[in-house]
Image (spheres, rainbow, N blue to C red):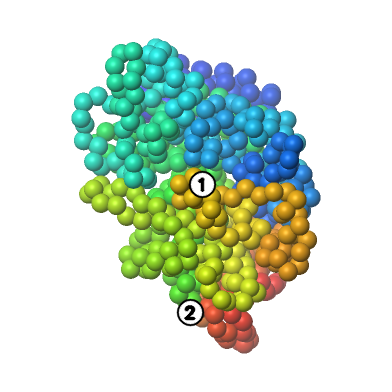
Amino acid sequence: MTEKTPGLLSYLYGGNISARLLEQTQNLLDQYRPRIKPHNGELTERDSILITYGDQVQHPNEKPLQTLRKFCDAYLTGIVGGIHILPFYPWTSDDGFSVVDYRQIDPNLGSWNDVSSMQNFRLMFDGVINHISSQSDWFQKFLQDDPHYKNYFIAIEGKPDLSQVVRPRALPLLTTFQTPSGGKKVWTTFSDDQIDLNFKNPEVLLEILDILLLYAERGADFIRLDAIAYLWKEIGTTCIHLPQTHAVIQFLRAAMDEAAPHVQLITETNVPHADNISYFGDGSNEAQLVYNFALPPLTLHAFHTGDARTLSDWAKTLILPSNKTTFFNFLASHDGIGLNPARGILSDAEIDSLVNKVIEHGGLISYKHNADGTQSPYEMNINYFDALSNPNGNEPLELQVSRFIAAQSIMLSLIGVPGIYFHSLFGSCGWIEGVKQTGRNRTINREKLQFDELQGQLADKNSLRYKVFTRYSQLLNTRSASSAFDPHGTQVIHDLHPAVFAVERISPDGKSRRLCLHNVSRIAVSFSVNEKQLSLEPYQAFWLKTT
């Protein structure tokens, strides 16, 4: 452990018990270290990560994880470097993010052996550690007044003022459950099936550390800390981004650095950009990667307006605290397009315009509670292809594909590691029928696909999936071939034309450079670069080798 670890434990739990906790932590690390296979975890330009559900691709009479492996081996070997398999544990709601048992694989998906068989790719596992399913053994024992689990969860007595608590959902913060000792109001940030864990109990911290070490043993190269900003609760505060939350992340980082230094932590915090990047810590003590949440709405804004200046101005602020950290860039995910990260960058009117355009394109809007009792748009639920191109419009398909690929090219060219949602890589559109089936907005971007049908579409040169996947693969291959796109290199944003997003990527040794140019407008544009006149067709993306 680092020399700061005792201080972190003392800060979180007091000096009286920190010595015992330090010893227990060291014992855990000593147990796992011989069981974790060490390897080089360094990131390179070849690292891009597919984001997918374990049952994203299905085939009759076959476990979905087995089908996913076959599909990825056949289509993605050499195209992407890693796979983020969204929560594959037993679950009860939220498509996997209400975990029943952190240590098991959902038998409907497959087994740990099926996960291990995918290690031709670097693997990302989810650490859904803010909350656990109401049907979990832990919470069921809490409901039985089991003394060991009494303090695993947060039971609120009386009527304290919780008005400052930041809410990510328009749902009750507290849920009442009956126990032998009476009704208990329990903290449920996300839903009444997702029970927040009580990290004020040091036994919870040790339990979670044990689980994350198990993930490292099972082959995780990345561990995604889901909804981590809400981890620590203090009545009378906002209960988001608290110093204790950062201390917990620092503790987990120190532990992983000792037992599994190749494993990288990535924080998922769908919040304003300044708060988001605080999870880098000092550049050495918290997350190695941070989700770049402002990128999806700002890129969408650029293409909706045909003006890249706001996106460019924001991108100029993307400064990393050290060469050991980088951004996790993405445009689409299993969730929607978050609006909070754009607040303070886009005006209220510009955010309203985004919302209205998404509704016009057949999308849905999710809302959150504000401290003043009002609600505001929190997330735009729509497939990113549809967000860019109105599915009810009459534009030529090739133009829609070019617009979509130009947006993806921006994401791929920025400093960081690209995260590519399955439906983006394979050109999916919105699944309205799914929303009707589940009643949940996010289902619009979560359609599961049949292996044989998807193969057929990828073999059809006239299909949308073929056109998107072919062009996306070409970009990924070009990116992988140049050290200019090293996640720990540097970048310079150039102001060449209001409609052009221009980023120059430079390798860590300075020997390789690529100028990546993107026309975000529907008209051709001309501009000068180093006294040379260049032009870009509508929605054209062009990566120029400069050295």
State the residue at coordinates (69%, 23%). Answer: 34
Relative placement, left or right, of 189 versus 261 is left
Cα–Cα span, label 1 and label 2: 43 Å
State the residue at coordinates (45%, 75%). Answer: 305
Q: Quadrant of residue 353?
A: bottom left
Answer yes or no: is residue 406 visible. Answer: no
Residue 134 location, x and y as percent? 44, 27
**Which amino acid, mark 2?**
Pro
State the residue at coordinates (44%, 16%). Answer: 141
Quadrant that contains the N terminus: top right
Question: In this view of the protein, which residue sits in the foreground, 15 or 262?
Answer: 262
- Mark 1 vs mark 2: which is more N-terminal? 1
Secondary structure beneath label 2: loop
Relative placement, left or right, of 234 versus 117 is left
Residue 404 location, x and y as percent? 59, 67
Relative placement, left or right, of 543 versus 444 is right
Query: Which residue is denoted by mark 2 in the rendering?
Result: 498
Quadrant that contains the C terminus: bottom right
- Tell me whether the residue at label 1 lies in contact with that at label 2, contact meaning CB atoms closer than 8 angstroms: no
Query: Which residue is denoted by mark 1 in the rendering?
Result: 437
Answer yes or no: is residue 187 visible. Answer: yes
Residue 61 location, x and y as percent? 74, 36
